[in-house]
Amino acid sequence: MTMTPAPDPAILRAVERLDYRVTAGDIAAQAGLDVNLAQQGLLALASEAGGHLQVAESGDVVYQFPQNFREVLRNKYFRLRLKEWWEKVWRVLFYLIRISFGIVLVLLIVLAIAALVILAIAASAAGRDDNDGGGIDFGGGGGGGFWFFPDFGWIFYPNYTDHYRRKESQSGNLNFLESIYSFLFGDGNPNADLEERRWRTIGTVIRNNRGAVIAEQISPYLDDVGQGFDQEYEQYMLPVLTRFDGRPEVSPDGQLVYHFPSLQTTVVEKTKSRAIPPFLREALWRFTQASSGQKITAIVLGCVLLVLAGVLNVWVGGVAISGGALTFVKAIAVISLGYSVAFLGIPLIRYFWLQWRNRKIQARNNERELRSHQLAQADPLLEQKLAFAQQFAAETVIRDEDLIYSTETNLIEQESEQADRIDAEWRERLEGRG
């Protein structure tokens, strides 16, 4: 038994943005989806969510969905309910994972200090037994304090970073434990939705130009337009044609323009073109969203742990200690050293990697911006191509009066209504001739 796949979330979001009444072209342009996939997705969604099909005289199909279609799908699909439940659980789990790195860091510092205390007590006991001072003296004079211990109280002092915390809370940014994770691993890919933005913007460009464009209008939103003959013959337009069901048209001068009939039919009446950026801009990767104070604190804590781990690993072999205490001290020494090296090393490596990656991103942004400037400063040949493309520009807005059939009402009633309408039209024509 085959299981029906759950509807595409991109289609669901697009239907909601377009007020629950759409064509396949509307969805393809809004969500940047392949026209055929949008068509199939709408048919499946209409079947599963109680949507209705409306057919215009032109043969174009409009899809009408109830506003509670998500609730209908949720009740029907166990996987959708499971997915929503897991998303809620994952948010909690991921938050715990994020703060765990800061908790482990502070915990290791505390345990390293405890291990040093154990070593100091053992060394002090060995010194008293020998009476000759041959043991390692970890104690200070007079007061019995451990002179080599720095004052770590500031790590746990609640007011230490109050001014940073106030500043971050005002801007709604990271708390201290979250900032540790951000310092280590960053804050995610800023271009995770790049492909969705790319195709959604290209669909909007085509829509704004009423379904007819030239390659120079699309190239500022693509990464690689090729070189040599590939660029000259506009091979980079093939994925766009495939996705949006387009076709090339050749001018008398041999210039190519691109016609997208599937995006020329809509139910959305617009008074003006939708605003779009002149080119696709990738966001640069940020090292961290942590504040300056949080970064300094993270580095200081990492260095403190590294120093403590180094002291433990050097001194653990020179103190007479055995049993469980020795196992504990050695374990903390090894774990603290490994964690502190990783804690300071991972951000350092990531910093240089981000510098290299951002240079690549900036180069792509510059190339796309240059193509947009070439379009803005159109030469006569480019103007000629734009003029030829306008011959194929068109837009068909399907209104209620254009519909001849809908699954919302009985077929016999619709045929009766259509017959009355056709008779009325014929009477008007006959009277007009008379």
Image: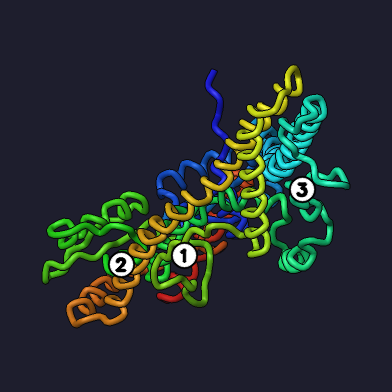
- Residue type at mark 3? Trp
Q: Which residue is mark 2?
A: 367
Q: Residue at x 71, y 48 (%)?
A: 68
Residue at far right of view: 143
Which tag is nearer the camera, tag 2 or tag 3?
3
Q: Please tell me how crowded label 2 is: few (under 14), some (14-19), or many (20+) other residues with Cα within 10 Å.
A: some
On residue 111, the disc is: none
Residue 91: name its quadrant.
top right
In the image, residue 293 sits, relative to residue 349, either above or below, namely below
Q: CA distance from mark 2 to mark 3?
A: 61 Å
Specify the amino acid type for callout 2. Glu
Secondary structure of residue under mark 1: helix
Callouts 2 and 3 close, C-beta under 8 Å: no
As drawn, the label of residue 426 is 1
Q: Position of residue 31 (x, y in %)?
A: 49, 54
226 sits to left or right of 42? left
Q: Tag 3 or tag 2, which sits nearer the N-term?
A: 3
Q: Secondary structure at mark 2?
A: helix
Image quadrant of residue 202?
bottom left
Residue 376 versus residue 171 in the image, above or below: below
Image quarter for residue 154? bottom right
Image coords of residue 250 (percent x, y): 17, 64
Q: Dot 1: within a 10 Å radius of its alpha carbon, few (fewer than 14), some, or many (20 or more) residues? A: few
Identify the residue at horizontal 52%, vertical 72% (top origin): 270
Q: Amino acid at mark 1?
A: Trp
Foreground residue among 335 and 40: 335
Left or right, residue 214 beside residue 197: left
**Label 1 vs label 3: CA separation?**
107 Å
Residue ranking furthest to the front: 132
Please state the horizontal and vertical placement of residue 382, each as a whole percent of the image.
22, 76
Mark 3, residue position: 147
Say which label, 1 or 3, has the lower sequence index: 3
